[in-house]
Amino acid sequence: MGNTQSEILVIGAGMAGLACAIKLAAAGRSVTVIDKGRGPGGRMAARRTEIGGETVSFDHGAQYFTARDPGFRAAVQAWQSAGAVAPWAAAGDEAFVGVPGMNGPIKAMAQDLDVRWNTRAERLERSGDGWLIETDQGAIRAKTVLIAIPAEQSHTLLAGVHSEYAAAASQVVSEPCWAVMAGFDERLAIASDTARDPDGAISWAARNSAKPARAGEECWVLHASPARSREILDRPKDEAAQLLLKDFFRQCGIEPAEPLHLAAHRWLYAMPAALQGDHARFDPSGRIGIAGDYLHSPRVEGAWISGTMLAERVLDPA
Ligand SMILES: Cc1cc2nc3c(=O)[nH]c(=O)nc-3n(C[C@H](O)[C@H](O)[C@H](O)COP(=O)(O)OP(=O)(O)OC[C@H]3O[C@@H](n4cnc5c(N)ncnc54)[C@H](O)[C@@H]3O)c2cc1C
């Protein structure tokens, strides 16, 4: 990337960072977004894989989202008209999912922005009246830097740079979540497409192939509860996948079936306990701000609200 210059740099192209960038760009501000991920998703991730010669996508992060805030409802309506989200009644009357994968809205938001994937912010440093951001792809200079990544990762960037925001980020504790993606050649004997059990080892299970616009014969995503996730946090992926699949069959009371495909992903910072106070923070004299679900609520909608509020603060800091 070399040494590039931008007016506003947003670190993190998840729902919060992109909501922020879209509002700033719509107000005529020049914005660049960087994300360490290979492609659009963040915690609204979708992973493609081949099962029996067919390309299948699993939503292994957020499963669905609800929209209650009027501004967020309007955004969801626009995504729905653009074919990036669809209702999914199996998760509730008001539930939506991205299509064709959960990252549908993230892809749609990113397409009109200058987003650079595969670019990890490693260090921030004040430079003149702005910032020098060191990334694994070279340095970026920006007048304003906005950080929209999970609290624990924000803290690493903020420590020694902005003590108040670093202290806020350090108070946040996020629950981990092991997610299992399992594909079968036959339908499992489970009537419902979703199963929720806050007290079980598997706190959520969804027939991913029953979501709108999904391929795949019989694909399931299983989320381990925070307690079960912590218990097996450092197990190798394959072992965690096997253990959690057993938990799932036991919990559903059905005979174990041999999966055609089995994989696991460990989310270390899946669900933060949100901080009280402002839902977005911006320091106009330091030209630095923070957004993310951890400042509102650990949900897609919470991330959108926080990112949008951060843009509002930047546009009208008074
Ligand atoms: C397993 C799981 C289940 C969930 N279920 C639901 C649900 O059912 N409903 C719901 O509403 N919400 C759910 N959520 C929560 C929801 O996904 C999040 O609240 C929301 O997506 C957070 O958006 P964000 O923009 O704040 O963060 P993220 O989506 O985490 O985005 C942050 C981005 O920053 C990038 N990044 C991190 N560090 C750096 C760095 N140093 N440099 C550059 N880029 C960086 C990451 O790659 C990422 O793309 C779930 C989350 C998980 C993990």
Image (cartoon, grey):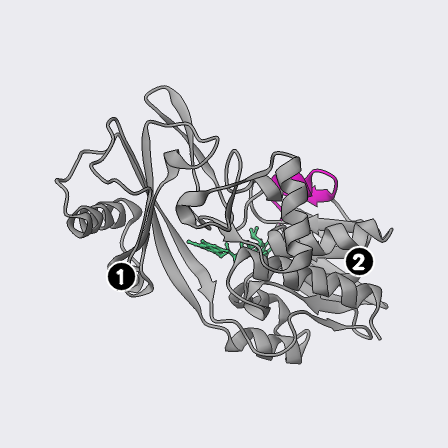
Residue at 59% across, 70% down: 295
Start-end of magenta stretch: 107-119
In this view of the protein, which residue sits in the foreground, 19 or 81? 81
Image x and y of residue 189, in percent: 20, 37
Residue hosting label 1: 228
Image x and y of residue 308, in percent: 70, 60
Residue 25 appears in the picture as rendered = yes
Residue hosting label 2: 142
Q: Quadrant of the N terminus?
A: top right
Q: Verify whether residue 117 appears in magenta.
A: yes
First in sequence: mark 2 vs mark 1: 2
Q: Is residue 23 left or right of residue 222?
A: right
Image x and y of residue 57, in percent: 43, 33
Residue at 20% across, 50% down: 243
Label 1 within 8 A of ligand 1 by Cβ? no
Q: Verify whether residue 22 appears in magenta.
A: no
Alpha carbons under labels 2 and 1: distance apart = 42 Å
For label 1, the crowd category at 10 Å Cα-Cα, with few meaning under 14, some 14 to 19 and many 20 or more, is some
Q: Secondary structure at mark 2?
A: strand
Q: Is residue 308 left or right of residue 58?
A: right
Q: State the residue lying farthest toward the front.
A: 93
Q: Tell me the amino acid under the disc marked 2.
A: Ala
